[in-house]
Amino acid sequence: MTAPAVPARRTGAGLRRYLPYVTSGLQGLLQYRITFLVSGITAAVTAGLLAYLWREVFAARDTVAGFDLAGITTYVVLAQVLALLQNNRVDEGVSAEISRGDIAAVLIRPVSYPVSKFFASLPVSVANAVVVGVPVLGLYALLLPLAAPTWSGLALFGPALVGSVLIAYAVNMLVGLAGFVSTNVWGLRTIKDSAVALLAGQLVPLAVMPEPMAAVARLLPFHGMVDSPLRLLLGRYSGAGEAAGILAVQLGWAVALLLVVAVVWRLAIRRLEVQGG
């Protein structure tokens, strides 16, 4: 009768092995306290500039692609908060460990390297969102007209936010693992940041983009990082069926990218072992 409890205990023990990585992530934050200030200024300035540009656009019209001024302002401010949440520095950390040769030590640890990096990134994401994102959102809630989400929007935003974090982690992890084939991934990280800013809907919603560009963006996973969660939060969907479809697509991309991370890591381990570490 007690057999089903064994796998649960093993699962709990397995997760406890990753708690030190959460702690190390928190400790690492203390070394980059100035980053919070820089991130806050960058997010606040970017959100302010975008809000000002949209205010000028709405001076000549009432709606754009179904957005009113309060809706588009809310979108651009929350998009910057989501960008902070996704700034987990996994790509930077993984590529640095590969460059220094520290990556060889992970082969003797009884943990999964990709999973350990995910747990280490969680405090970074949460701290960015709470310490920087919440004050930025509070500032613009006082300065600009923002649209209040509905309870259903908040309920849908919860799982969409989880999917957003998973996609961001997987994308950053893949960029970091590119360090196995490149001595410097700075250029790739720059390209990734630019692609995410544009194709995720971080700068403008996909609904506002020219249709050819929006069609390309919908075929890629990046929209699950910003545009999809904010569509659900702001109620920009027609009925429960479309909302479920948005979540299903986002979940599908998250699972697919995590599987790609697992495959790439396996290939990287083989290369590391063949070369002797």
Image (tube, rainbow, N blue to C red):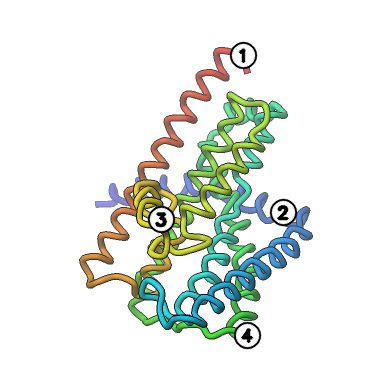
- Where residue 46 appears, x then y in whole percent? 64, 66
Numbered disc total = 4
- Pointer 2: what residue? 27
Q: Quadrant of the C terminus?
A: top right
Residue 106: assigned label: none
Camera-near label (1 vs 3) is: 3
The image shows residue 255, relative to residue 244, as above or below, that is above
Disc 1/disc 2 C-alpha distance (Å): 32 Å
Count neighbours of disc 1 (C-alpha within 10 A) and say few if under 14, some if 14 to 19, many if 20 or more. Answer: few
Count neighbours of disc 4 (C-alpha within 10 A) and say few if under 14, some if 14 to 19, many if 20 or more. Answer: few
Disc 4/disc 3 C-alpha distance (Å): 28 Å
Under tag 2, what secondary structure? helix
Q: Mark 1 is on which residue type? A: Gly
Residue 224: assigned label: 3
- Pointer 1: what residue? 276
Circles 1 and 2, Cβ within 8 Å, touching? The answer is: no
Disc 1/disc 4 C-alpha distance (Å): 58 Å
Circles 3 and 2, Cβ within 8 Å, touching? The answer is: no
Disc 1/disc 3 C-alpha distance (Å): 39 Å
- Pointer 4: what residue? 143
Q: Mark 4 is on which residue type? A: Leu
Which residue is at 43% across, 80% downward? 68
Q: Mark 3 is on which residue type? A: Gly
Q: Splitting the image into 4 quarters, where does residue 106 fall?
A: top right
Which residue is at 54% across, 36% downward? 113
Circles 1 and 4, Cβ within 8 Å, touching? The answer is: no
Which residue is at 52% across, 51% downward? 196
Under tag 4, what secondary structure? helix
Which badge, 2 or 4, is on the more N-terminal residue? 2
- Where residue 107 appears, x then y in whole percent? 57, 27
